[in-house]
Image (spheres, rainbow, N blue to C red):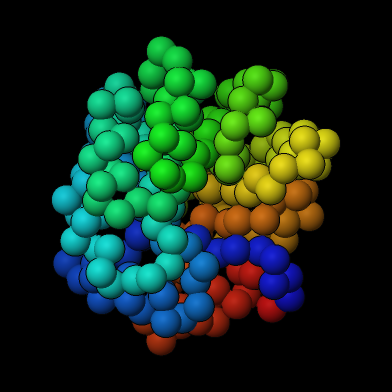
């Protein structure tokens, strides 16, 4: 088991009719973060939730709320999600004209800033951002829907970014999202990931299975 690996269940796979209860259940089951996928039907082909839902869920957990913004333009909504209770705001370089300015804005709100790389976005995108971010998220599927299969060539990207982070000497989390299950989780960890987003694999089997699912994803 790797205690340094954080598990961030994606509530995209939770029962949306019972979201508050589901968030409490994964908290009690030992998750480290709560991952919230925000989609606008424009930047990605799906629509999920907005700041009001983040605000409604905030009292149900003391764990960090890790909010992945798959929306464009993203800058308009940073203040609202920060005020709603997000601890980490993660954005795509393609979702606004100036990713560095977006990162600066997130930091000015007192939040941790993350940058997301889609499967087709190269690690090199981080060259002039690595000194400013708190988290890098590698998408191992194309964003927009849960339940997709892991794209294995992203393991090379994870390895490359792990080297960049280690070279920077900064405390930057390397997160992987997409197709993470009991088979792919060890591969992502071996490549250098230290935060795993897992929706389907966490919520499979209902609340009584969550603790065991999280433990297995962590490598236990």
Q: Position of residue 99 (x, y in %)?
A: 48, 21
Tell whether 182 sits left or right of 146: right
Is 203 or 60 nearer to us in this picture?
60
Tell whether 11 sits left or right of 80: right
Residue at point 19% right, 61% down? Answer: 56
Q: Residue furthest top?
A: 97
Residue at point 58% right, 57% down? Answer: 196
Residue at point 32% right, 65% down? Answer: 14
Q: Split into 4 quadrants, where in the image is the C terminus?
A: bottom right
Tell whether 49 sits left or right of 138: left
Q: Split into 4 quadrants, where in the image is the N terminus?
A: bottom right
Count of marks overlaid on the render: 0
Does residue 143 show up?
no
Q: Residue furthest bottom?
A: 208
Identify the image quadrant of residue 157: top right
Does residue 120 show up?
yes
Identify the image quadrant of residue 166: top right
Residue at point 33% right, 27% down? Answer: 74
Q: Position of residue 15 (x, y in %)?
A: 26, 67
Is 153 or 84 nearer to us in this picture?
84
From what the image shows, is residue 165 above or below residue 32? Answer: above
From what the image shows, is residue 13 above or below residue 67? Answer: below
Q: Position of residue 95 (x, y in %)?
A: 39, 22
From what the image shows, is residue 57 above or below residue 129? Answer: below
Q: Position of residue 33 (x, y in %)?
A: 47, 63
């Amino acid at each position: 088991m790797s205690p340094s690996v954080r598990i961030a269940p994606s509530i995209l796979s939770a029962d949306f009719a019972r979201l508050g209860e589901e968030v409490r259940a994964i908290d009690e089951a030992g998750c480290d973060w709560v991952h919230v996928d925000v989609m606008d039907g424009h930047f990605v082909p799906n629509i999920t939730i907005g700041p009001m839902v983040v605000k409604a869920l905030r009292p149900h957990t003391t764990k960090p709320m890790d909010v992945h913004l798959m929306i464009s333009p993203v800058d308009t909504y940073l203040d609202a999600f920060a005020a709603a209770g997000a601890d980490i705001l993660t954005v795509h370089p393609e979702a606004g004209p100036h990713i560095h300015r977006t990162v600066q804005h997130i930091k000015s709100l007192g939040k941790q800033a993350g940058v997301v790389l889609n499967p087709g976005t190269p690690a090199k995108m981080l060259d002039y951002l690595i000194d400013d971010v708190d988290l890098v998220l590698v998408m191992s599927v194309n964003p927009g829907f849960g339940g997709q299969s892991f794209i294995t060539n992203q393991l090379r990207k994870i390895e490359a970014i792990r080297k960049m982070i280690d070279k920077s000497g900064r405390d930057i989390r390397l997160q992987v999202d997409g197709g993470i299950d009991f088979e792919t989780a060890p591969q992502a960890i071996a490549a250098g990931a230290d935060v795993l987003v897992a929706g389907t694999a966490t919520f499979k089997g209902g609340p009584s299975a969550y603790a065991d699912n999280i433990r297995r994803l962590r490598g236990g």
